Image (spheres, rainbow, N blue to C red):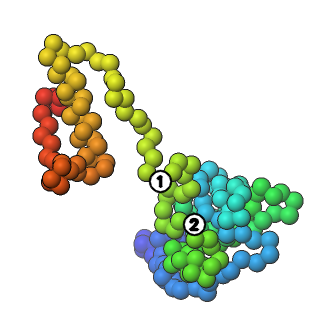
Amino acid sequence: MPKNKGKGGKNRRRGKNENDNEKRELTFKDEGQEYAQVLKMLGNGRLEALCFDGSKRLAHIRGKLRKKVWINQGDIILLSLRDYQDEKGDVILKYSADEARSLKAYGELPESAKINETDTYGQEGEGDCNFEFDEDRSGSDDDNGKAKDIDSEILTAFNLITQGPEMDEDGKDITIKLSTEFLL
């Protein structure tokens, strides 16, 4: 039997993507539509989006886009708002990164919009850590106080890595030599 080389059945997904990199006309929002950024994919064709008017909405990916246009966290999308449900909407269009930059240049998107970043609108400020170090850690100390020395070396090395090199009074970098005993 001859091999199936057509684009029917499952082969339609394996066919050539002929208009993959083709430029399309930039679509602006109309009345009843809003720009949004995807916060979280919920599954089953639904996602959580933060609209640029400041509200979080549950959005439904319409059938035209399903399995054809893949939407990920952090993507800029165009939502159609529902008249009867303010907290829900439907995804009409996904903007590429270039189109989103163009929208930002035209002033359609706010300057705070993060394009091409998955960590969008984090609740913590920039540079915040989610863990803390306790300097007065009570551990089992040896007779010589080796544990305290190792703790202070680790803390100093951590500060050096996160904040940059320390300087002495002469303005020269202080080099820190760590003992490898605590690594074993």
Q: Residues within 10 Å of mark 2 (few under 14, many from 20)?
A: few
Q: Which residue is mark 2?
A: 112
Vertical order, 87 against 156 (above or below): below
Considering the image in quadrants, where does the C terminus appear? top left
Asked whether 160 or 96 is in front, the reply is 160
Q: Quadrant of residue 36?
A: bottom right
| Crowd around label 1: few <14 · some 14–19 · many ≥20 (10 Å) | few
| Depicted 99 relative to depicted 146: above or below | below
Instruction: Specify whether residue 16 is in view.
Output: yes
* Residue at point 21%, 34% (across, down): 153
Q: Is residue 53 above or below residue 130?
A: below
Q: Earlier in the sequence, mark 1 or mark 2?
A: 2
**Which residue is pictured at 17% across the width and 32% down the height?**
183
In front of the other: 134 or 42: 134
User: x and y percent of residue 59 in the render?
Assistant: 70, 58
Residue 151, relative to residue 127: is it above or below? above
Residue 52 placed where, x, y %?
Answer: 67, 65
Q: Residue at x 12, y 33 (%)?
A: 179
Amino acid under label 1? Answer: Glu
User: Cα distance, mark 1 to mark 2?
Assistant: 13 Å
The label shown at residue 126 is 1
Q: Secondary structure at mark 1?
A: loop
Amino acid marked by disc 2: Ser
